[in-house]
Amino acid sequence: MSDWHIDYTSYDPAEEKLREALCTLGNGYFATRGAYADAAADERHYPGTYVAGLYNRRVSAVEGREVENEDLVNVPNWLPLTFRIGDGDWFSIDAVEILSFLQRLDLERGELLRDVRFRDASGRTTRWRERRLVSMGDCHVAALQVELTPEDWQGEVTVRSTLDAGVTNGGVARYRALASRHLETLDARDEGQHRISLRVRTTQSRIEIVQAARLEVADGATAAAEPAVRQSPDLIGQEVRVSTGEAPLRIEKIVALHTARDPAIAEARLAALETLDRCTGYEALARQHAMAWRHLWDRCDIGFDGPGCNGEQRKLRLHIFHLLQTVSPHSVNRDIGIPARGWHGEAYRGHIFWDELFILPFLTLRLPHLVREAMRYRYRRIGAARRAAAAEGFRGAMFPWQSGSDGREESQQLHLNPASGRWLPDRSHRQRHVNAAICYNIWRYWEATNDTEFMYGFGAEMFLSIAQFWGSIASYDPTTGRYDIKGVVGPDEFHTGYPDTDADEAGGLTNNAYTNVLVAWLLARARDVMDLLPPDRLTEIMELTGLDEAECERWHEVCRKLKVPLLDDGIISQFEGYENLRELDWQDYVARYGNIQRLDRILEAEGDDVNRYKVSKQADVLMIFYLFSAEEVTQIFEQLGYAFGRQAIRRNVDYHLARTSHGSTLSLVTHAWVLARSDREHSWQLFQRGLDSDIADIQGGTTKEGIHTGAMAGTVDIVQRNYLGLETRAGTLHFNPLLPEGVEWLHVRLQFRQHRLDIDVTPTSLDIRSRPEVAPMIDVAYRSHYRKLIPGGRQRFALVSPSARSGSRTE
């Protein structure tokens, strides 16, 4: 099998929704799930289409409460294309006998292909060969091309193409009790010249969406006449009747999609028709689309090989493919964030969480302008973040755990536990660590790009405003002489309060270690941010934010006296009081339930509470070692006045890994990362499992609701930064490669401070080549051996053998 193809060689209705998510086509502006062109939403199929960042609010009655949720909107279904022979039934993949089958996702060209031979109830054999794209060349265009071949029959065929606005948000079972109709149909028109249009509007956000479609059908060399148009309240379609012989019937459906939010248009319908009229046919669109993908792959492909590899290259490319469909050059100037589940489904309602922490490193080192755009999404909502902080009595800016259209907190008030059927209070909004993640992303972007315009223009203001929030939320405890941060929830997510606390009154946790370590880092780094600024700009920001020297001095004190709870032998406690929780009988729960990834749901269904146990959904403490090298961790703890040596890292990894259920796909990424240098075999196994997390749907049905963008990006980041040992520090690109056993070659393309770099690693060598560019000289280093690299230049290093290295994660 090609490393550029994902192939399915049989039709499996039970797996269809999973395949639809994995075979989604998108371009950063809109995405369409890989459903069959003949399929309607039912138990087997869910043909959703989503415009990036297009949300709508509805109020639902749940458990005697009125609950408001904002959802990514499932917009009209442009896919429907089917046929019938004579006056028979319309074709459906579920109503025929399949004789041969191939479904291929072509990652290199960005096309979905289907080749199906089938026999209908009348015994007639037909072949359906389909190509599909959502154009990366023109982000407003999608297209289908079908070659329909009668193998043992001739007769009259009717082809039907439809635009369907009768859709709802029904792709996530646990949301189905909530209000799900987000569209109202305004009008549908026969536009002539084989064209139709459909105009709808979201019910609350009042955004118009227009689709225009053209249907062309040819029998051999003869084009069919103008299609007949059929309409109903939420649907408009075209039908063409042709007589077919031995020659294949050629069908093309070209669709243009615009919304009223698009820049540089006069009106959405006019724009859609103009876009449609520019499209000369599928082949021309496919050439333009393939060229755009070739340009992206030239910057973003990662290659690796060796006797220990078995399909990992293909899976890694699938992950890169979906990242680039979620955020692409078409995302620029559209005010959209990067959602946790892509634009591939309705899970998490299309909201933006902290997953940027896992996603942005890949983009920062390849397409940095997309990272700047993601930061602008946050900055445009800094006013809402400031109001949120003030409402809770804090200074600065407090960004929400879930973000959508306008920057308010979009976390649910209630969530459904499918294991018990009960609606429960949702306290996930207390994950304030998303604010620390934003600062981390700002600094890492700055290190990699030296983008002064970004830092001066809005990066520094955002960083310092978040530092203000953390400085004000920290409270001094005179009994310990340290500062506490109270009322938060860590990345673990299982623990939202202390045992036997009423869920409606749960006040979060005190001194979550991950949160406090990250806050100590960013408050210390805030002074570096201030030192980067020209005096006039620093004065402006201080006046704008009300920041003064006294407050900055307090940050300096807080970052040296924040409390990090430590247990015996250097074990970092997940939060204050963690040591008093019970140990879980893991063997018993595995024996009874098998899959215990979501222990919180299992325990709640038993009448118990996960807050009572030392269990984690995903990495929490270990996120510290994911974000920082051993050297940086040691320095942070020294800054805080704690003795914490490198040798304690492995003990912490073992301790917390043994108490983690991996209820999130991000957990596999983090643990593969922190084990990469101390237990290469286990790390490689976790990495392989992470690559399979969506492909094999290891969470038991969540991928069909949308791919896990952060986990996909995290696996790519493991290859590009962890196996390379890549860090950006003090303007220098540092390398310390250590390939997994069985991997003998790794090739990565990066962009660092205007240099486009080709990097090749083997077990014995590191080769860095800079492509000819107009750029300043940069510094590269391998294990403290520093060299200069000029544009078009090359540097090679001989690597120290793994057996000569220490066991810590990062030397």
Image (cartoon, rainbow, N blue to C red):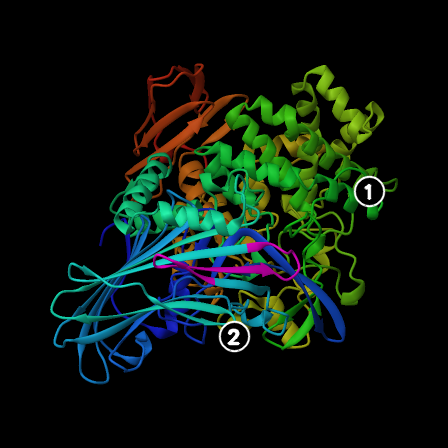
Q: Is residue 810 visible?
A: no
Give above or below for 614 relative to 82.
above
Q: Quadrant of the N terminus?
A: bottom left
For residue 394, the mark is 1
Which residue is at a point 72% across and 66% down the rendered structure image?
A: 67
Instruction: Provide the secondary structure element on which disc 1 rests.
Output: loop
Query: The magenta stretch spans which residues?
Result: 189-208
**Could you classify mark 1 by the number of other residues whose Cα lies within 10 Å: few (under 14), some (14-19), or many (20 or more)?**
some
Q: Single out the residue that lies furthest toward the bottom.
A: 122
- Residue at (65%, 33%) from the top-left corner? 636
Q: Specify the amino acid type for callout 1.
A: Phe
Q: Residue drawn at (63%, 58%), measured in percent from left and top?
A: 56
**Rendering coords of residue 610 (x, y %):** 66, 66
Near-viewer residue (75 or 178): 75
Q: Nearer the viewer, mark 1 or mark 2?
A: 1
Of the residues under marks 1 and 2, which one precedes in the sequence?
Answer: 1
Q: Which residue is mark 2?
A: 593
**At label 2, which amino acid type do we have?**
Tyr
Residue 190, position as x, y percentages in the image: 42, 62
Looking at the image, can residue 222 be seen?
yes
At which x and y percent is residue 647? 55, 38
Q: Element under label 2?
A: helix
